[in-house]
Image (cartoon, rainbow, N blue to C red):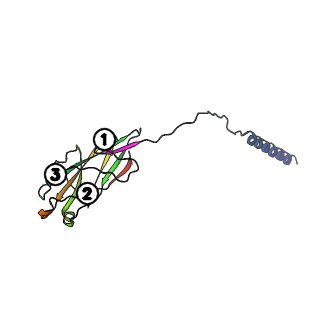
Amino acid sequence: MRFRQALQLAAVVASAVVAGLFGVQGTLALWTVSASSDAGMIQAADFRLDLNDREIPGGVAAAAVVLGSPTTVLTPSSPVFVKVDVTLTTNATAPFEMEAGLGAASISETSSAELRRNLAVSYAAVAGGDCGTPGLHYTATAAARVSTSDKTTFCVRLALREGAPLSIQQLGARISVPMEFTQIGI
């Protein structure tokens, strides 16, 4: 009987200790430390993308880059090159990069279906920003990494296909080039 009474007494004491800890919000740790602090502020980094030194406004799905008037006439034997610089500026402390991608161009605002068929738009990402470098490989799409506070250059090549009729050489058109940006961690 003694053993049973000792067991009941131990259970009552353990229950009292647990109830006491819950009542005073205590802990069974050997020691505890706490510190108070004032309300803090968390700020995400800002970053800015510029095309040819013009800011792309945040939340905008499209931005226009004025290609200007070419100084040479576009013919099947002489393409026109336009440089597009992409700059990434940020106040982030951790390094990261963006990947800029150029998609297939669409040609609009022209009355000539013949011009749409014969105008070829292609791209190349170039180091150093020189679009006149011989041997650049131009493709229908292009992608390149843009490092923080650095500039990446794309060359846009406008050309008339061989055998294009002379009647389309003086026509105008709007060329839309989709650009997509993806953040890449380092």
- Confirm or deny contact between disc 2 and disc 1 (CB under 8 A): no
Measured Cα–Cα span from mark 2 to mark 3: 24 Å
Q: Which quarter of the rendered picture does the C terminus lie within?
A: top left
The residue tagged 2 is 175
Foreground: 154 or 169? 169
Foreground: 43 or 15? 43
First in sequence, mark 1 or 3: give its number.
Answer: 3
Disc number lying in front (2 or 3)? 2
The numbered mark at residue 135 is 3
What residue occupies the far right of the structure in this picture? 1
Q: Amino acid at mark 2?
A: Ile
Above/below status of 21 relative to 99: above
Question: Which residue is rendered at x = 48% and y = 40% of the image?
Answer: 43
- Examine the structure image and report whether residue 39 is included in the region drawn in magenta: no
Give SS at disc 3: loop
Foreground: 33 or 75? 75
The residue tagged 1 is 150
Quarter of the image holding residue 88? top left
First in sequence, mark 2 or 1: give its number.
Answer: 1
Measured Cα–Cα span from mark 2 to mark 1: 27 Å
Measured Cα–Cα span from mark 1 to mark 3: 24 Å
Give SS at disc 1: strand
Which class describes the residues within 10 Å of circle 3: few (<14), some (14-19), or many (20+)? few
Please state if 159 lies on the left or on the right of 148 as rendered.
left
Magenta-highlighted residues: 46-69
Give SS at disc 2: strand
Which class describes the residues within 10 Å of circle 1: few (<14), some (14-19), or many (20+)? few
Above/below status of 163 relative to 12: below
State the image coordinates of residue 39 (x, y, percent, origin top left): 57, 36
